[in-house]
Amino acid sequence: MKKSQIVLDDTDHHLLDELQADAGRTLRELGDLVGLSPSAVQRRMGRYRASGLLSRTAAVLDPSASPDLVLAVCLVQVERESRRLHEAFNRRLLATPEVQQAYTVYGEWDYVVVLAAGGMAHFNEVSERLFMDAHNVRKYSTLFVVDPVRTGAAIPTRALRP
């Protein structure tokens, strides 16, 4: 959640790019990459956190390391539109750990949901619980991922300039 507006300089953009590529590096390593001292990197990261720009730091696992992993992109169309119904469906998605990403979209479909499951039986259980048992879902379609060519959630920071 955004807490306050933050103005980014070129070093901020570079540091944010490096953090999104690998936040597990030490402050010294990050500082060497962007031309700052470790303490200056730490201060900037604190500013990003305080502003809400940096919301969390997470580990990214390699999908190929889990042989039973089933990744699926689900397109969802709802029956009726209302703020209350969308909020209820959003809560349903947020409460489901198998939901990796979820987007409200315009067009024929209302949601794009990315699921990660531990095999087809697990996928079937999750998709039935999320979509078939949801009273406001009109229909859904599933696209199974054959090869995750590129995964990630990096945000282009240059677009964040005021």
Image: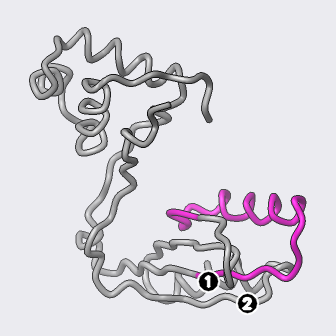
Residue found farthest to the front:
162
Taking the spot 50% from the left edge, 79% from the top edge, the residue there is: 73
**Residue 20 in the figure: left or right of residue 46:** left
62, 53: nearer the viewer: 53
Q: Which one is closest to the eye, mark 2 or mark 1?
A: 2
**Residue 86 in the figure: left or right of residue 112:** right
Taking the spot 12% from the left edge, 28% from the top edge, the residue there is: 33
Residue 78 vertical position relative to residue 140 in the rendered view, above or below: above
Q: Which residue is mark 1?
A: 125
Looking at the rendered structure, the secondary structure element under dot 1 is helix
Question: How many callouts does the rendering have?
Answer: 2
Task: Please state the extent of the stretch shown in magenta in the rendering.
Answer: 75-102
Taking the spot 43% from the left edge, 77% from the top edge, the residue there is: 118
Instruction: Tell me the kind of residue under disc 2.
Output: Lys
The CA distance from mark 2 to mark 1 is 16 Å
- Quadrant in the picture for the N terminus: top right
- Indicate the position of residue 116 as horizontal and vertical percent values: 46, 72
110, 62: nearer the viewer: 110
Q: Which residue is mark 2?
A: 139
